[in-house]
């Protein structure tokens, strides 16, 4: 292993790493993922140690990926990929800030990284980080992605090395240096290769769910309301899962039934057939499609067209008033429910609304573009039952502080809104407590 655990001495060594104390805050950077790794099997989907290699050949045989594991450390997992997402986001942030002197060596505060990927900052979280870095450095990938006339294949590890600097006296982390592989660094440096992802990605608990979100974001992100449809067999091959095909299908069916991945709507097509397919659509495109169709249906016809249009016969009953008929036809049930949920979630528009009627498509357009900012004390924002449950199951935390962090996650991605705010925050707190409870005094 080329990684090293460094400690501080006195004099020049400490001065050498004073740069770590002046690093800007990167704990809340916008998240970016490297899209070439999002739809193919680069990581193990299990937390169990995997040593069996991944062998992938695309259906047209144009792309190959071979991933081999170090017997001692095992293969890098989809959870370890959280670190690579952060590093890609870190480099993208530096580029956005105008830093033109970027290199594969990234200097960071591990606390910033751990907070952003929601691993917590306990001693156990730091141990988990070191184990993940070992796997990322020890896993070997061989692929012909980005092959050209001079290069047929490239072999690399995710990171070339890492150095962790700690204070000898206090054992406090002073900073970390991670050197990325040239393959990964060069890819991230092309801005076209990085895609924005939801901060709620880190709430996904299953390995297959995490991979499916990334694959869906890559496949469906640019396809609008049409989304992307793919067969279960092909999806199984692209995932690199060690599960049998029947077991894999059952897991996909369950994920589609729950349909709670951030940003992504999943629909199974032909679920009872021998060759089912999965349709992935970004929810924001689905909302937009409903809004457009509602506006089209709500647009009154011109006087000339109205004069020529035949009046439909309505035997044995009186024709309803045109306004009532239009309202009944233009309101989509899902849209109405969505609007009601937005209204009760405490949305505030930054601009005057032209209508207060939630059936008005203009209202829907304004509401969809309004960032969700709640604010206030946790006891006032959450429903009483949920508040009591959190205080009972997750004691010792300042909920007013954590609810601000939770709102910051939601506000950084305005396309994502929980169906039930209190229920989502309860899930957030349970995971936060499980990850960080050992850092509480007296635990």
Image (cartoon, grey):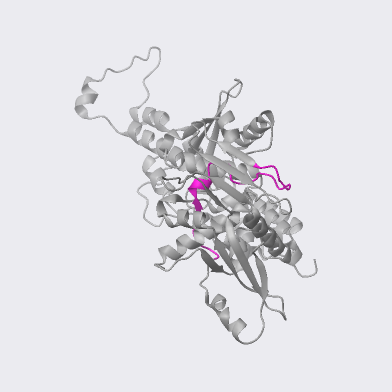
Q: Is residue 196 left or right of residue 82?
A: left
Q: Is residue 377 visible?
A: no
What residue range appears in magenta? 27-53
Quadrant of the image for the N terminus?
Answer: bottom right
Q: Is residue 328 above or below residue 74?
A: above
Q: Which of 342/279 is in front?
A: 279
Which residue shows up at 60% across the image and 52% down it? 81
Q: Which of 280/100 is in front?
A: 100
Image quadrant where residue 222 sits: top left
* Outermost residue, bottom side: 11
Which residue shows up at 38% across the image and 30% down it? 324
Q: Position of residue 422 (x, y in %)?
A: 62, 51
* Outermost residue, front side: 150
Which residue shows up at 37% across the image and 51% down it? 353
Q: Position of residue 338 (x, y in %)?
A: 50, 41
Q: Position of residue 173 (x, y in %)?
A: 66, 73
Q: Is residue 259 above or below residue 20?
A: above
Which residue shows up at 58% across the image and 58% down it? 159
Magenta-highlighted stretch: main secondary structure?
A: loop
Q: Is residue 405 magenta?
A: no
Image quadrant where residue 407 sits: bottom right
Quadrant of the image for the C terminus?
Answer: bottom right
Q: Is residue 337 visible?
A: yes
């Amino acid at each position: 292993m080329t990684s090293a655990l460094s400690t501080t001495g006195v004099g020049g060594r400490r001065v050498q790493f004073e740069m770590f104390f002046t690093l800007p805050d990167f704990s809340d950077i916008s998240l970016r993922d490297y899209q070439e790794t999002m739809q193919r099997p680069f990581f193990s989907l299990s937390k169990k140690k995997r040593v069996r290699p991944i062998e992938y050949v695309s259906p047209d045989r144009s792309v190959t990926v071979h991933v081999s594991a170090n017997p001692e450390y095992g293969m890098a997992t989809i959870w370890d990929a959280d670190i690579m997402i952060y590093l890609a986001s870190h480099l993208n942030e530096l580029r956005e800030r105008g830093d033109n002197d970027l290199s594969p060596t990234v200097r960071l505060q591990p606390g910033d990284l751990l907070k952003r990927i929601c691993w917590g900052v306990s001693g156990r979280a730091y141990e988990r980080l070191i184990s993940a870095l070992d796997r990322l450095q020890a896993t070997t990938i061989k692929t012909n992605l980005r092959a050209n006339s001079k290069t047929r294949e490239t072999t690399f590890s995710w990171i070339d090395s890492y150095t962790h600097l700690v204070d000898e006296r206090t054992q406090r982390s002073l900073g970390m240096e991670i050197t990325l592989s040239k393959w990964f660094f060069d890819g991230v440096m092309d801005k076209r290769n990085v895609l924005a992802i939801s901060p709620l990605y880190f709430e996904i608990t299953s390995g297959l769910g995490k991979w499916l979100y990334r694959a869906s974001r890559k496949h469906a992100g640019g396809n609008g309301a049409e989304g992307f449809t793919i067969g279960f067999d092909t999806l199984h091959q692209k995932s690199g899962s060690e599960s049998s095909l029947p077991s894999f299908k059952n897991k996909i069916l369950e994920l589609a039934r729950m349909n709670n991945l951030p940003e992504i709507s999943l629909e199974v097509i032909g679920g009872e057939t021998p060759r089912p397919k999965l349709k992935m659509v970004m929810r924001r495109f689905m909302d937009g499609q409903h809004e457009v169709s509602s506006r089209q249906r709500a647009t009154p016809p011109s006087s000339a067209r109205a004069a020529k249009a035949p009046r439909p016969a309505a035997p044995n009953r009186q024709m309803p008033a045109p306004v009532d008929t239009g309202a009944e036809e233009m309101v989509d049930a899902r849209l109405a429910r969505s609007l009601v949920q937005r209204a009760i979630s405490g949305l505030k528009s930054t601009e005057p609304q032209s209508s207060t009627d939630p059936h008005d498509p203009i209202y829907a357009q304004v509401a969809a573009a309004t960032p969700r900012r709640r604010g206030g004390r946790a006891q006032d924002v959450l429903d009483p039952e949920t508040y009591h449950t959190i205080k009972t199951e997750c004691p010792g935390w300042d909920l007013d502080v954590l609810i601000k962090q939770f709102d910051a996650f939601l506000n950084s991605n305005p396309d994502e809104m929980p169906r039930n705010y209190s229920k989502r925050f309860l899930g957030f707190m349970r995971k936060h407590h499980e990850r960080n409870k050992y850092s509480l005094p007296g635990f």
